[in-house]
Image (tube, rainbow, N blue to C red):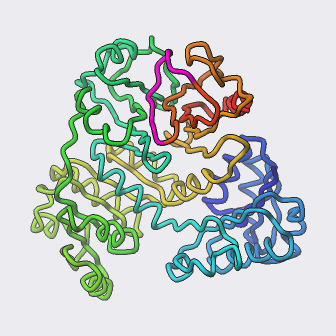
Amino acid sequence: MRVIIVGAGEVGFQIAKALSYENIDVVVIDRDKTMLKRVMDELDVAAIEGEGGDPAALREAGAESADMLLAVANSDETNMIACLLAKAMYNIPRKIARIRNPDYFKNEKLLSKDNLDINPAINPELEVAMAIIRLLEVPIATDVEDFEGGIIRVVGVKLHDTSYLVRKSLKNIASMMEKKFLIGMIERDDKAIIPSGDDIVTGGDIIYMPLKKGEVYDVLASIGLNIIPARKVMILGGGKIGSYVASKLESVIDIKIIEKDKERCSALSRNLKKTLILHGDGSDQKLLKEENIGDMDMFVAVSNNDELNIMASLLAKKSGVRKTITIVNRPDYIPLARSLGLHAVLSPRLITAGTIIRYVRRGDILSLTSIAEGKAEILEARVGSRSKLSGKLLREAKIPHATLIGAIIRGDQAIIPSGSDSIYPDDKLIIFTLRESVKDVEKILT
């Protein structure tokens, strides 16, 4: 497979990094020499200096034999022109583009197969907003990922030293459960562990669990992780992300938005029906106290200022808010924000890159989702008729090293498997694995 990436910024870099691990033939195009130097110094991929919308640059990148073009430059127009050229001049089968402008993103005719043929368009603000909404739905989680339209929801939760699960082995935990239950991955310090039944959970671990739709609250409660629904939420930042989150949730949650720009406040007041709009500075402790920040269930910082988001989240935490969700654009700020004890730290660029990577499908692997800061992957994969897994009980199947099957989706039925469950052709599997094992997983599927 040959993939051309237009744009060597953080999104393009992270996509190229992930695909290079899969031994996919990657070429990155950008006019910024500094960004290209980072790509060439750190990654084993080709790089071309030029405009993404330049036919000569695409030709040099091997567009005539490319399977996919990923347009993730900072300019929507550059991305759309690159996709148009990829279709009209080089007949590249699939084009995926980052599109920020809502007027472009919502224009189905423009993006359709008859015109630009972009499938899909990815809107970073919308992807971040959806990630925030998933976290608001499961307030104790550090990460929530949906598969097959939410039939399976993978929830990451950090365990405290006093947790019911701590100092117990996974097989003992499973034996205590009324429903089938497993832990697909453990993040411990800077390591990712694909566990076996003998592994013991410790305080500070972040555990990732595949859970059936409709059973998330009940299963988490059964292991002592009770979810208190968020009823009061304060959002710092009334931009596209804050506005979208409020519009989706204001009918069921009391929401306050703090926004510094007066004109933006007026626009929010016109577009939102129940949300309270506050004109002010989110770092103003007096304002936060006047608005009873201590009574909030959750505080969501989504302004364009990373430092403000971190500082305001720390103030919210200190004031007694149960959970904070903090947007951080600079990747080097993410470890800092987490080290300060902030609950959920999200990077729009990494979320966008992760979303796009999910669509780079190879054979029977339908999608790849990076978790735990890229330490591990969740694969959604289809079992082929000639697969080595087909017709076997799970305990008989030869699963690659550092790999665990977390769920089986059969039609509209979801199964959290044990060793006695069988695998059949056309089953879709949710697989937890380390990056170095992805190729081995691919081999057993076809």
Q: Is residue 104 magenta?
A: no
Residue range corresponding to the magenta coloring: 412-422
Q: Quadrant of residue 108?
A: bottom right
- Vertical placement of 80 versus 381: above or below? below
How far across and down, in percent of the image, does residue 61 sit? 86, 63
- Vertical placement of 64 versus 240: above or below? above
Q: Quadrant of residue 217?
A: top left
How far across and down, in percent of the image, does residue 43 sit? 74, 48
Residue 87 left/right relative to 415 = right
Instruction: Say which residue appears at 24% left-offset and 27% top-offset.
Output: 222
Q: Observer-nearest residue: 252 or 312?
A: 252
Q: Is residue 413 magenta?
A: yes
Instruction: Say which residue appears at 51% left-offset and 52% top-offset.
Output: 332
Magenta-highlighted stretch: main secondary structure? Answer: loop
Q: Observer-nearest residue: 59 or 417?
A: 417
- Vertical placement of 378 versus 261: above or below? above
Residue 98 left/right relative to 339 = right
Figure quadrant of the C terminus: top right
Q: Quadrant of residue 173?
A: top left
How far across and down, in percent of the image, does residue 182 sit? 41, 25
How far across and down, in percent of the image, does residue 131 sit? 41, 55
| Count of residue discs | 0
Q: Observer-nearest residue: 408 or 327?
A: 408
Residue 45: tell me if it is visible: yes
